[in-house]
């Protein structure tokens, strides 16, 4: 959802044009983000997400969350402090470090990135996971990161996705593990053409005709709720809107758009959501009907109700995490180019492992569990 330029002055909008300085700054930021992502992954992922996992999954997840959360914090720093995009929160003020399921509208290809701004403020940045289309796992470097963070990749065909989704969800049910699981029930980003198809389907089936969101698909949401409900603190219903234009990834990197991101949050207790699939489907449809009205009001007024629920992002926090990234990156560069050849061998083996593990969606099981399963299987045979 975007707001037309009439809600801001023409001069204000012109300030967001792609100047040579913005172009240079964006290229440098992208190179830094990609290179540091690569170094963090090849040096830290085999230890944090593979070796430690052989002994304790909970410890592995905590270490992975902490280390890679430091790197992820550079994105909100880029958005809010370097590009000076205003991120404005409204609705309910939510407590820190909850285990939550997030449902959000999907206006553009980068909606999911702005959830990091909220997660960073709540101390949950390294714990956020997404249900995303499987083709994104093929992205260079980032695909490795998605795998290490345990994102759930789907084909958007329920008969194929259901067993994969339920298997992954079963590993997230332990309250020991911090969790922010984000789902986009529309299943795809919003376009006018998709909206017309959604409205036609709604008219033919007696469903609400929505203007600013698509009709949600409920099976994935219901599976998440069914398998995680007892271990969740709440469900966050998040609605995202933009001024003055919906951004692309390049807009985010170069700081062209958006000038403002508005994030409205409704915190809903899991006990307030029905458990049966039929009732959960109706509840989700009603929720998106409310989102549609929120976005309609946003277009008319230029803001969501009850703004100002979150403070501005702390510059000290951002700089502290940036310093940690710089120090670790410096260490990795020294080990790679000025130390033993065995570190080059380690990098090569890390790349091979990450490529294979991501392609085959492989994660090692704890040794104790493997031994227990082997003993159990042996007893059954005898």
Image (tube, helix red, strand yellow):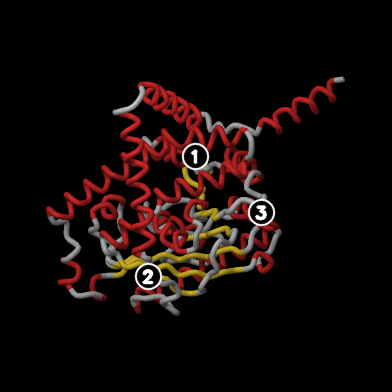
Q: Which residue is mark 3?
A: 175
Q: Is residue 180 left or right of residue 176?
A: left
Density class for disc 1 (Cα within 10 Å; few <14, some 14-19, many ≥20) is many
Q: Is residue 369 left or right of residue 61?
A: right
Figure quadrant of the N terminus: bottom left
Figure quadrant of the C terminus: top right
Q: Earlier in the sequence, mark 1 or mark 2?
A: 1
Q: Position of residue 125 (x, y in %)?
A: 47, 55
- Residue at point 51%, 41% (across, down): 153
Answer with the quarter of the image where residue 239 lies.
bottom left
Disc 2, SS: loop
Disc 3, SS: loop
Q: Which residue is mark 1?
A: 148
Q: Earlier in the sequence, mark 3 or mark 1?
A: 1
Disc 1, SS: helix
Q: Earlier in the sequence, mark 3 or mark 2?
A: 3
Dots 1 and 2: beta carbons under 8 Å? no
């Amino acid at each position: 959802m975007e707001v037309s330029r009439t809600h801001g002055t023409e001069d204000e909008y012109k300030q967001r044009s792609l100047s040579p300085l913005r172009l240079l700054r964006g290229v440098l930021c992208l190179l830094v983000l990609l290179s540091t992502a690569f170094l963090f992954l090849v040096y830290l992922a085999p230890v944090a997400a593979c070796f430690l996992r052989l002994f304790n999954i909970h410890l592995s997840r905590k270490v992975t969350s902490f280390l890679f959360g430091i790197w992820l914090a550079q994105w909100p720093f880029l958005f809010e402090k370097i590009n000076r995009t205003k991120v404005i929160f409204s609705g309910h003020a939510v407590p820190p470090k909850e285990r939550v399921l997030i449902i959000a509208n999907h206006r553009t290809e980068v909606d999911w990135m702005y959830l990091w701004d909220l997660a960073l403020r709540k101390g949950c940045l390294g714990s956020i996971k997404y249900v995303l289309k499987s083709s994104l796992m093929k992205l260079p470097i980032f695909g490795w990161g998605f795998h290490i963070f345990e994102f759930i990749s789907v084909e958007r065909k329920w008969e194929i996705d259901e067993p994969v989704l339920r298997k992954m969800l079963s590993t997230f049910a332990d309250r020991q593990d911090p969790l922010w699981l984000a789902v986009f029930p529309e299943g795809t980003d919003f376009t006018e053409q998709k909206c017309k198809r959604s409205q036609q389907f709604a008219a033919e089936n007696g469903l609400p005709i929505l203007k600013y969101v698509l009709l949600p698909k409920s099976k994935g949401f219901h599976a998440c709720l069914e398998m995680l409900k007892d271990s969740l603190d709440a469900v966050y219903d998040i609605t995202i809107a933009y001024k003055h234009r919906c951004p692309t990834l390049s807009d985010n990197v170069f700081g062209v758009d958006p000038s403002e991101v508005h994030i409205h949050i409704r915190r809903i207790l899991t006990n307030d959501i029905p458990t049966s699939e039929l009732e959960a489907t109706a509840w989700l449809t009603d929720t998106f009907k409310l989102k549609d009205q929120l976005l309609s009001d946003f277009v008319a007024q230029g803001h969501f109700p009850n703004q100002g629920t979150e403070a501005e992002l702390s510059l000290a926090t951002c700089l502290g995490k940036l310093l940690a990234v710089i120090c670790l990156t410096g260490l990795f560069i020294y080990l790679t180019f000025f130390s033993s050849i065995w570190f080059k061998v380690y990098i090569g083996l890390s790349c091979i492992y990450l490529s294979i593990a991501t392609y085959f969606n492989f994660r090692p099981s704890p040794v104790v569990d493997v031994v227990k399963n082997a003993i159990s299987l042996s007893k059954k045979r005898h």
